Amino acid sequence: MSIKTLRKRIALVAVSALGVGLLSVAPASAANLDGSTFNWGSAAATAYTSATAGFCSQNDTTDVLVVRYPSSTTSWKLESADTEDIAATKYAFITASGGSGYFSTATSAEDGNDEAVDKSGDERTLTIGNTATGTALDVPEDMTWVVTGTGTVSFNLYEVVISTGAPTLLETYTLIVGANCDAAAAYSPTYSGSSLRTASTALTASTYDDGDDSAAVSVEYATGIAYLGFWLRDAYGEAVSSTNSFLNVTTSGGCTVSGTTTDLSSTSTSIVVTSGITNKVVKLFAGSSKRNVCNVVATYNGTKVADHTVTFKGDAASVKAVAKDFAIGTSSVGAGFYDVFDDSGARLASFAPTATDLTGTLVGAAISFGASTASSTQGAITIDAVDGVRGTGTFKIRVTKSDGSFVFSDPITMLVSGSAATYTMSLDKATYGPGEIITVTVSAKDSGGRIVPDGTALAASAGALSFTVAGATALSAAPAHTDTSENGNWVYKYTAGTTEGDWAANVGLSGIATDTAKQVTYVIKSKSTAVSNAEVLAAIVKLIASINKQIRALQKSLRR
């Protein structure tokens, strides 16, 4: 069920409360009868106006016509401007429920006399077309209802496929007949709504129930504003009146509100709007440099029409580097990311940091920062160090607050190093049991003994890499020349095989001309407690030798 269908069904309660009877409703978006659609009107495609005696209001979105009775006008029409036929395989019927009145015999053909429209005995149902398969017939140009008393009449238009006999509800039209038009001025939530927005655009009939914009519910400090739009309608979908009426918008939690979206000088915690109420847009302001959670409540003539919560993030309170590299080269490289936080620890967006307090090898470096466009993303740090400089250096990230003061990060240490000049290979243990995990680490350093920059490729090409671990298999992907370093290391996992003995791991990086291939040996040995035949035989031999020794000692003692 669509939201608008649900709203129309809720309208049953609203109309009943207004004392005009029970209203049965159906989908608001009009279905068509084989291409023909109907609307309330004095003629084809001509809506009723105040020029027609007894007319109160009409809403073609909700298909509701409100009229007075008694009045000099007693006949009200559902008109169709289409020139379509109903298929020979179908027929239709429209049935009235509630209220007082009947279908008139003045129903006319739209382009000839080949339509078939039959009235029921109680004159509250019209059948359109042949109920048995025949020829295509005209859809009537209009269907006229004669009012005989007050009340609410619901007209359900059905289509029937003759072969199945099953009716399908196409549309419901509503005629509300009252002693006067006063009921239309009352607010109703059925066709009304309000929502938070990031722009001052007014709500419309198609957007009023779209819900709040997420960026207007949690507002970045750099933005600092949100908009609250209203769409206020009565029980029939008509605009509420601004005459002798007021819209009161009140805020709590530290934010303020303005009745105009352009003049920022008249903000307060409570405003009263007396004009343009029906689709008013108000502007909300953070009101503080610290994070605050703001509640906004609006009433129309004392009836609550809106209740929303907005979180305004605070100004920058801290900044720090996250997920950063430690070692970098001298060319422009992505060295990590940064975060800016408000006083509550919420991540902020849209700040433009600068680097300051550069020391050591970072003096003279070009350090730039990418903008964090949303609180769900981090800003990038890029460093272009001075060519030929090697060693450690530090810098801080500085963010400017709205009052012109600064927020600094802690010092961030970076190592500027060169390409690999030496490398090593190591294992985490010397002996492994069958099936154990072997951790193999390749490490590289530049000519000054500093670890190579993070992100350094293992080898220049596939042909420049030789990597084997005999007696074991790679736990995941085998080493590739494109693998990159972290903290000067490339780490791989292998599974020891089941064959016991001495084995070797080898790595060769032919692109590093200043060093040679490396080999590390290891042992695979079972940790089983079972005794082998060789161990049993050795024990027997040892035992016999011990016995023989004791016999000789005894013989020697007896000779004395």
Image (spheres, helix red, strand yellow):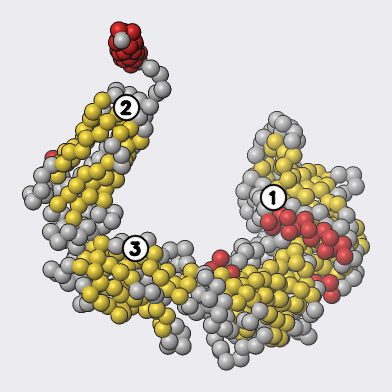
Pair 3/1: label in front: 3
According to the picture, the residue beneath numbered tag 3 turns out to be 324
Whole-percent x, y for residue 507 in the image: 18, 40
Pair 2/1: label in front: 2
Q: Residues within 10 Å of mark 3 (few under 14, many from 20)?
A: some
Q: Earlier in the sequence, mark 2 or mark 3?
A: 3
According to the picture, the residue beneath numbered tag 1 turns out to be 1
| Mark 3 element type | loop
Residue 492 occupies quadrant: top left
| Mark 2 element type | loop
Q: CA distance from mark 2 to mark 3?
A: 41 Å
Query: In this view of the protein, can residue 307 be seen by the observer?
Result: yes
Q: Earlier in the sequence, mark 2 or mark 1?
A: 1
Which residue corresponds to the image point at 47% horizontal and 63% vertical from the top-left?
Answer: 376
- Identify which amino acid the numbered label 2 is placed on: Lys
Q: Residues within 10 Å of mark 1 (few under 14, many from 20)?
A: few
Indicate left or right for 254 with 499 as reference: right
Contact? badges 3 and 1 (CB < 8 Å): no
**In the image, which disc is placed on residue 297?**
none
Residue 300 occupies quadrant: bottom right
According to the picture, the residue beneath numbered tag 2 turns out to be 525
Report the front residue among 178 and 390: 390
Which residue corresponds to the image point at 58% horizontal and 84% vertical from the top-left?
Answer: 287
Pair 2/3: label in front: 2
Which residue corresponds to the image point at 62% horizontal and 81% vertical from the top-left?
Answer: 255
Report the front residue among 165 and 7: 7
- Classify 465 as above or below 365: above
| Mark 1 element type | loop
Indicate left or right for 494 with 34 as reference: left
Which residue corresponds to the image point at 63% horizontal and 69% vertical from the top-left?
Answer: 195
- Classify 558 as above or below 311: above
- Identify which amino acid the numbered label 3 is placed on: Lys
